[in-house]
Image (spheres, helix red, strand yellow):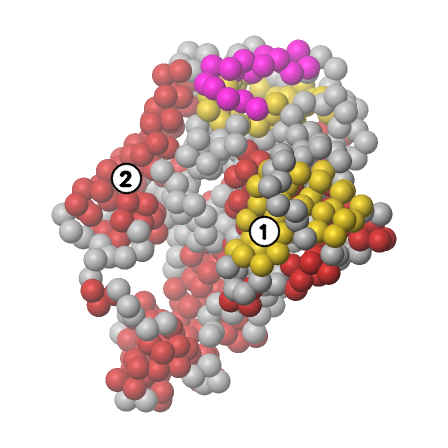
């Protein structure tokens, strides 16, 4: 695979990654208040060595670049903290203080990053916060820069739709996505040459406290200009690109362009392996092209919320145009091939980048990959089904596995045949066959050990960091079972930011529908605070296994239970406290609330993936 790589003699990225260095956090470790380590960048010191046989040389190089840690000057008045989380935190100095862009994943790393900035630039207060988009690594640490009691009068800017999309991704499908993310980011793998060496977009995700302060000012249109603490900012809305709600923006007086996560130094994901809404590669390319034209001539440096900046106007234009062409080519060629009747799997095997893009380091598939991105484009247009009737009603994995094993001649014969495929240089089919054996007989230790070895082989050869982590994490769980802590996306810091409709929706998606088929109840919530819910009567109806809710001004029928409460009291109810303890006003039958909650399920945060 390394034969197709760009030239290692091109060290421009290393020079750019080191440019403007002011100082590092020493040691490069961040701990929570209880002493638990939530970030350890020093663990990647092994990347200073030559690439071993257990890693792809391109991915090793990317790790060397991402592992650089510290405070960097982007241009006069603009600084970045890099290497203290998966993402970067950017700080822009204003008239009275500093504007924070994308305060990392967790409170602890964001606080450490702000402290590092203040160590070198002085004790400036935070006078503004900007979320570039709706992914948790760009807002989760906000309480580390704006602790409780300090947010009054501080504007928090975000693209329109930010809160809705932040919640739909991180709360509604949060349990499944977080479990799969443990594979994607290699949670629980040793940080070592034969383990987790990064994720392409950065080194890893921190594991501290997630928080969220809702935006106070929405960016609703391209061309919108705002002034925060004396700093002029011109925005470009880019919805449907790397996130459903995202934006680029220019600091015209600094001649600096923030590219959010729309243009980074690797191929990004059209659909992440952890799961998400499929992104639109076509519109992604269009917005990058719009950025080239809309901001032309008005910047000398481009920086993003991951990786290192690009300096020089012409260099930024070239970078943006190549990134544009990357997503446009991926989209257009996938659509061309699907219209010729090829399936997503077939397209993924056929598609390859033009030589000029394949030789650009920033277009390499360290985080997204050409293979799974092509399948994502196919999915966006045609869905999961490839049109073949044989695939319309296949057995689920366990039943399919049993039948494969039977056809192969039994478990022992299937394992032997799989080993033969592996030895003959086809670990992909060896993994397929062994996976069927494991799902047919999860107690078959020989099959699990054999599959773990095949996964390791596939992981060590992967240029894509998330593929590597999936393979190695799968091997680890086959040997050791489910291990490792996961980020908690349901903590109070997240819940308090949700609107009341969002809180109710989070209950609705947890209702055990079959158990609630015959239930029929109504509960009114009369909200005493807001905005915008103050004085609102919201009726909850559980019927046919479905929890629905709507605002009712003058109810035509009485509810079985009415609760008069503030949002904080609703949060207390959801946390398991009782009505009397919380001082909630009650009218009607309080037993209805217990009946409703009796149908709410709590999903297993560590459900199996590589075993049934």
**Disc assigned to residue 541:** 1
Q: Position of residue 148 (x, y in %)?
A: 79, 35
**Disc assigned to residue 83:** none
Q: Where is residue 290 in the image (x, y as percent from the top left)?
A: 36, 21
Q: In this view, does 237 lie to the left or right of 125?
A: left
Picture residue at 47% right of the left edge, 19% below the top: 221
Picture residue at 26% right of the left edge, 84% below the top: 407
Q: Identify the residue under disc 2.
A: 331
Magenta stretch, residue numbers: 218-234
Picture residue at 41% right of the left edge, 34% below the top: 241
**In the structure shown, which secondary structural element does the residue marked by tag 1 occupy?**
strand
- 440 w.r.t. 269: above or below: below
Residue with the most extreme left position: 340
Residues 575 and 173: in front is 575
Q: In this view, does 581 lie to the left or right of 311?
A: right
Marks 2 and 1, how far apart at CA: 43 Å
- 536 w.r.t. 195: above or below: above
> Is residue 182 highlighted in magenta?
no
Q: Position of residue 549 (x, y in %)?
A: 57, 45
Residues 467 and 43: in front is 467
């Amino acid at each position: 695979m390394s034969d197709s790589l760009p030239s290692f003699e091109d060290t421009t990225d290393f020079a750019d990654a080191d440019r403007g260095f002011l100082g590092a956090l020493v040691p490069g470790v961040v701990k929570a208040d209880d002493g638990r380590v939530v970030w350890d960048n020093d663990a990647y010191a092994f990347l200073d060595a030559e690439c071993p046989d257990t890693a792809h040389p391109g991915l090793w190089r990317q790790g060397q670049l991402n592992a650089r840690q510290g405070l960097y000057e982007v241009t006069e008045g603009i600084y970045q903290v890099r290497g203290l989380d998966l993402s970067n935190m950017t700080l822009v100095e204003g008239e009275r203080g500093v504007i924070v862009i994308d305060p990392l994943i967790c409170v602890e790393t964001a606080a450490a990053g702000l402290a590092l900035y203040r160590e070198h630039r002085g004790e400036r207060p935070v006078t503004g916060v900007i979320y570039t988009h709706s992914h948790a690594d760009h807002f989760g640490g906000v309480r580390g820069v704006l602790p409780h009691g300090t947010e009054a009068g501080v504007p928090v800017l975000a693209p329109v739709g930010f809160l809705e999309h932040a919640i739909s991704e991180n709360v509604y499908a949060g349990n499944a996505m977080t479990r799969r993310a443990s594979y994607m980011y290699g949670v629980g793998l040793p940080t070592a040459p034969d383990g987790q060496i990064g994720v392409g977009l950065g080194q890893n995700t921190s594991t501290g406290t997630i928080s969220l302060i809702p935006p106070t000012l929405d960016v609703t249109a391209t061309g919108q200009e705002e002034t925060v603490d004396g700093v002029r900012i011109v925005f470009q809305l880019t919805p449907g690109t790397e996130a459903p709600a995202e934006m680029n923006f220019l600091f015209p007086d600094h001649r600096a362009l923030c590219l959010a996560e729309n243009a980074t130094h690797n191929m990004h994901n059209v659909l992440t392996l952890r799961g998400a809404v499929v992104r639109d590669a076509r519109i992604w390319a269009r917005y990058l092209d719009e950025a080239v034209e809309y901001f032309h001539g008005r910047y000398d440096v481009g920086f993003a919320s991951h990786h290192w900046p690009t300096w020089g106007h012409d260099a930024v234009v070239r970078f943006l145009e190549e990134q544009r062409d990357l997503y446009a080519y991926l989209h257009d060629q996938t659509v061309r091939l699907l219209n010729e009747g090829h399936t997503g799997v077939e397209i993924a095997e056929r598609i390859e980048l033009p030589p000029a893009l394949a030789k650009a380091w920033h277009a390499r598939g360290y985080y997204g990959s050409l293979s799974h991105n092509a399948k994502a484009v196919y999915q966006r247009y045609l869905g999961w089904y490839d049109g073949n009737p044989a695939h319309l009603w296949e057995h689920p994995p366990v039943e399919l596995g049993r039948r494969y094993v039977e056809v192969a001649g039994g478990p022992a014969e299937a394992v032997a045949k799989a080993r033969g495929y592996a030895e003959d240089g086809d670990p992909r089919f060896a993994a397929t066959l062994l996976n069927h054996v494991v799902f047919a007989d999860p107690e078959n230790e020989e099959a699990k050990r054999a599959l773990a070895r095949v996964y390791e082989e596939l992981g060590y050869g992967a240029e894509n960091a998330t593929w590597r982590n999936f393979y190695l994490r799968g091997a680890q769980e086959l040997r050791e079972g489910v291990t490792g802590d996961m980020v908690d996306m349901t903590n109070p810091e997240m819940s308090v930011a949700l609107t009341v409709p969002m809180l109710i929706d989070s209950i609705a998606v947890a209702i055990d529908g079959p158990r609630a088929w015959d239930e029929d109840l109504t509960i009114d919530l009369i909200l005493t605070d807001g905005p915008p819910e103050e004085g609102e009567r919201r009726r909850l109806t559980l019927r046919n296994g479905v929890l629905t809710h709507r605002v009712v001004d003058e109810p035509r029928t009485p509810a079985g239970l009415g609760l008069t409460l503030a949002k904080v009291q609703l949060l207390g109810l959801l946390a398991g406290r009782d009505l009397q303890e919380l001082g909630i006003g009650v009218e009607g039958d309080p037993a209805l609330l217990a009946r409703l909650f009796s149908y709410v399920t709590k999903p297993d945060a560590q459900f199996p993936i590589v075993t049934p």
